[in-house]
Every structure is written in structure tokens, then in C-alpha cells.
Image (spheres, rainbow, N blue to C red):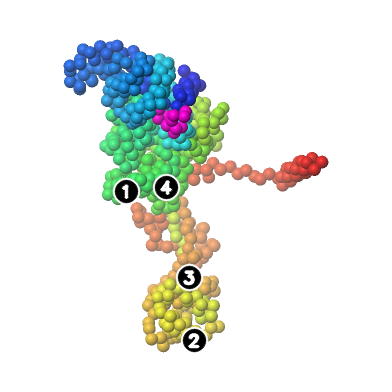
Amino acid sequence: MNTENHSQTAAFIWSVADLLRGDFKQSQYGRVILPFTLLRRLECVLEPTKSKVLKSAKVNQGKTDAVREKLLLRAAGQQFFNASPLTLGQLSDTQISDDLMSYVQAFSADAREIFEHFHFEEFVQQLNDADLLYQVVQRFASIDLSPGTISNFGMGIIFEELIRKFAESSNETAGEHFTPRDIVHLTTSLVLTGQDDKLKPHSIVTLYDPTAGTGGFLSEGDEYIQQVSQRVSVSLHGQELNPESYAICKADMLIKGQDVGNIKLGNTLSDDQLVSTRFDYMLSNPPFGVEWKKVQKQVTDEHKTKGFEGRFGPGLPRVSDGSLLFLMHLVSKMRDPREGGSRIGIILNGSPLFTGGAGSGESEIRRYLLEHDMVEAIVALPTDMFYNTGIATYVWVLSNNKPTERQGKVQLINAVDCYSKMRKSLGSKRQYVDDANIEAIVRLYGAFEESEESKIFPTTAFGYRRITVERPLQLNFQASPERLAKLADEKPLQKLDDDQQQALHDAIATLDADTRYRNRDAFTKDLKVALKPLDFKLGTPQLKAVLNALSERDEEADVCTDKNGNPEADSSLRDNENVPLDETVGDYFQREVVPHVPDAWVDQSKCDEQDGEVGIVGYEIPFNRHFYVFQPPRPLEEIDADLKACTDKIKTMIEGLSA
């Protein structure tokens, strides 16, 4: 069955919503339709061995539950069974709710749990109360969802379409639950291409998705590997936060014969339920730009207490976007390179490329990845690829066991023009990457050559030292009425009572109002003489406040110095420079700074914690800069001609209206 037929099947299933309209809210449609679709799919999968299961159930009814379950699973030939003689098509209109729930309870434990996450019994009762249950059951009983008609991959497409419709009807975000299949296929292809040695016959590989959704990445990864070598055993693992998405993913794994114990429900960041497991391949599409405030305590505690022995050792991104946390989580799941290492494919928005300056959590995470040579390639995708957003997105491919030719290097691939237009938009998704473009992108990656769409850089090309450039403080001082008035604005002086403030004002006013001092020491000496008659003493902060109120910056004034005779820095003239890692700070400073500001110097106190050198090391990946092509503006004559044509057209329209 092709994709168009899958969409037609999904549309027919969703037409059940016509029955629900009026008795159910729009936001509830999916909670009825999705579990019934799963129920019918499970029923169709079990149909060929149903009689064998019923026979085994009758013969072994006296055995213990554990033994009986093993025998029934063997009879079913699946990872689940149903021991009820009923089917959806056999349910009668009388006592249908009891019979239906009895039928569902006859599933094995893993399958029963799926319906619990949908609160299935609650919605069955609502349907029954509205006299709709029999009609809904009959509608689903008429749909052929057998594996011979619809493959597991096809069912994945159908579920995606249903979830998207559910999200639209309830104003939810479809992109939180699944990734479009074209993006899944591209990412999977990038991660698994060239892995023939690891995927040789009779090998066993593990695949993991920490944001599993409905299992799209896991299914696609499994299918890809089976195409490469049918005799490879693939063990699928995942964790998902949304109970309904988890239920669909678990059902998919059941049908595939996977160990559903490897699919976990819960928040991956705060409660990693596969904590000690390492994987060969990892694929993920974490939510874009979603804050992690709910799990901030757990994540921060792990960062502080475990450091690099935990998942978040390098640093923490800002709370407004947790996508880099998922990336670090995946890195922590990598196998030792001596055991073959691991490969990761993760979809991120543009923020992780450049957000955060030197020393920030984001920069430190990029630094860790690049200095440990884990980033293999970053692919810029076309916009309008996802159901819930049209923003720019990127596929990061990471490995801790790079081939020799890629070691110490990062490949950037610009695939923003590799797309086809969709005949009909699906939410914000207006474009897709067709098979031809996927092949072209994977070829660019595999060739590992410089071209207009492919750039190759050493990892150090993205690093820099952020140095602080200081310039000397130069001030003049004057006890003019205008500057004396500023004394009242200084907070340290506001602690004086009214009489003291007035006495201070009068004492300073004894200085010559017209004399402008261009040396701070000379002015301070005269100021202290003027303040001597006061019957109270100014503290150091208050004396600084007086000097601040009476001063102005002056390039012709003497440089202010500290007690050791060193020039003081003017904070208002402070600047930062990013020095490329492949250049010394001294050489850069002499070439780029000194010719413009000869009196400047580098603040030697700001040193990087890791290497102790001056300047804080930072990393960013300015992807667009490397692919920017200057487009010269159009000639003025051409622009003028367009403007004239436009004004002439408007003039003609106005004349037509007034005629």
C-alpha cells in the first residue's frame, strides 16, 4: 500500500469523528479513535493464530499464570496474545461495554497496559452512555488493518496522520509526538550509512531514542538495518514522556516482536530509566526551544554532584531551551570507542549552534563535543519541514569513533534547497525531502569533499578566546554648581542626615568653582583639605561617591592610577575581542587592537579555567556565515523603473475610480 492509500485509510478511520460530534469535545476525538485503531490492529495481527491460542488456553487453564502466559505467547507467535473467543465484529449490541472490556482484559499484560494509558474504559463508558459504542465498534471491525494489507511502516504513517489530526482538533502540538517520516528517513540514513562492518550478518546492534514519541525513529532504524542485512538482530530501546505516544510506541514494538520492557514511560532528563545501558546507534528529535524548568532541580543536582561522571558535566544551557541536555544525555550513552563506539543523529534548531558566549553552558557543551572530536557533520535542513514550526533546523551527526579521514574535522552540509513542495500543507509542513534529495544529501556526506554545499573545517576553526580589552581611566574634576548638584544622587551620600549633607556641600563649595583639575591625585589632595573642618569623617565609599559626582571623562586628563602606579581601567570603554584559537593573543592584539587604541591592554586576570591561558575559550558554529553568498543590490535605474511602473498603475486605478 502506498503513502496515498495510507492517508486514505487514516482519513476513513478519522471519519469516526462524525459519529462523536456533539457527544464528545473535539479535543477528545483522538482519545477514542487512537486506542480503537490500536485495538483493531492488534486483533488483525493475532487473527492467524487465534484458534491456536484459544485451544492452548482451554488445554492449559489449570496451569499457573506464568506458565500459561508463556504457552499462550508461544501459540500466538507474537510478543502478546488475547485469550478471549470474542472479536470486535462479534460483539453484540446488548452488554457491549462489558463484553468489550472483557475482550480487552483478555490481552496479555503488556497489551493491556497500552489501553490503560489511554483511559480506555472511561471513554468506552462515555460512548456507551451516548449509545455510540456499538456503532464505533462496528466501524472499526470493518477496517482491514492486517499486516498483509498494511505493513508496520504503513501503520506508522497512519498513526502519524491520526495523531496530527488529533493535535489539530485539540490545538495541541503535533510535533511533540512524532517526526515527519522524510526527516526520520534522512537522519537514519546519515547515521547508518557506511556501517556495513558493524551491520554484518549475525551481528546484534542496539538502537535508542530518548524522545521516542510514537516510535518513528525506532521503526525506521529497524527497517533500514533489515534492508542492509536481514540477518542482523536489532534491539530497540526508548523512553517517552507522553502516555498516549508511549502506548502507541509500545504497541508498535509488540507487533514487531521487540522486548517492550525496553520502552519506558517517563521524563528522560529527570528520570533516566535506562541509566546503565549503552547503545550502538541513537536517534532523537527533542522538542525545540522547550524550557526545562520542571526538571531543573534534578538536572542541576546531577550536574553539581556527579560532574563528568553524570550526563551534564560540561555545563547546563539556559532554562528556556533544553535541547542540548538531550544531546548530552545521548553522549553519555555512547559505547567505549574500543568496543566500536556509537553514532548519534539528533535534530536541533539553530540555537545550539551559537547561543551563549564564551564560558556559558551552551558554549562549554559545544567545547566538550568539539575538543573530544565527536561532531562529524551538521546538515542544514529546508524550512517548513515540521508540522508545528517553520523554523530552520539541523541534523547533527556525532560519533566517538570517527574514521581516520574525518578525525579532527567537522563537515557542514547546506541542504536548505534539497526539498520538494507538498501538494497540500500539513500544519506548518509545506515541504518535504523526497528520496532523490535524501540520496543526494547522503552522497554529499559520504563523499566528504569540499563543494558549494559541503564545507570541511578543523574542529579548532569554531573555537576562540574571548579577551577583555581595557583602556585607561582619564577624568577631570571640578567643584562647579552643576557637579555639586549631583552629590544628592549618590547613594552612599544619601545615608548622611540632612545637616551632614548640607555641611558636605558647603565644604566642597569652598573650592574654586572655575578650576578644572586634570589630575585626580591633585584634586583629591585639595578636596581633603576642604573637608577637614567637617565634624564627621567620610568613609571610603562616600569619598568615592564625591569623586564620582565631581568628575567627567576627559581624553586630555592624566591617567588615573592605583596605589601601585598602575593605570586604572575605564569600565565604560571596556571591550571584548574574540581571538581565533589558531592565533596567539599577543599577535592578534598587536595587529587588530593596538593600531586603533595604542593605550589599551589585555586584562590578564580573566583566564580560562581549563588551560590557565589568558582569555575565556568559547565555541560557536556560525553555519550560515560559511555558506553566505553576497547578492549585489539591483541597479538604481531598475528600481526606479519598477517604482514608476507601480505609481503609474496606482494612478490609473485612482483615475478609474473617479471616472
> Residue 473's mark?
3
Q: Is residue 161 visible?
A: no
Residue 425 as seen in the image, left or right of residue 68: right
Q: Secondary structure at mark 3?
A: loop
Amino acid type, residue under disc 2 in the picture: Thr
Q: Secondary structure at mark 2?
A: loop
Whole-percent x and y of residue 603?
A: 42, 63
**Is 66 or 39 nearer to us in this picture?**
39
Q: Earlier in the sequence, mark 2 or mark 1?
A: 1
Residue, disc 2 = 510
Amino acid type, residue under disc 3 in the picture: Leu
Of discs 3 and 4, which sits in the foreground? 4
Gap between marks 4 and 1 measured at Cα:
14 Å
Q: Earlier in the sequence, mark 3 or mark 1?
A: 1
Whole-percent x and y of residue 639?
A: 71, 45
Tag 2–tag 1 contact (CB < 8 Å): no
For the C terminus, which image quadrant?
Answer: top right
Q: Earlier in the sequence, mark 4 or mark 1?
A: 1
Gap between marks 2 and 3 measured at Cα:
27 Å
Residue, disc 1 = 297
Residue, disc 4 = 320
Magenta residues (range): 21-32
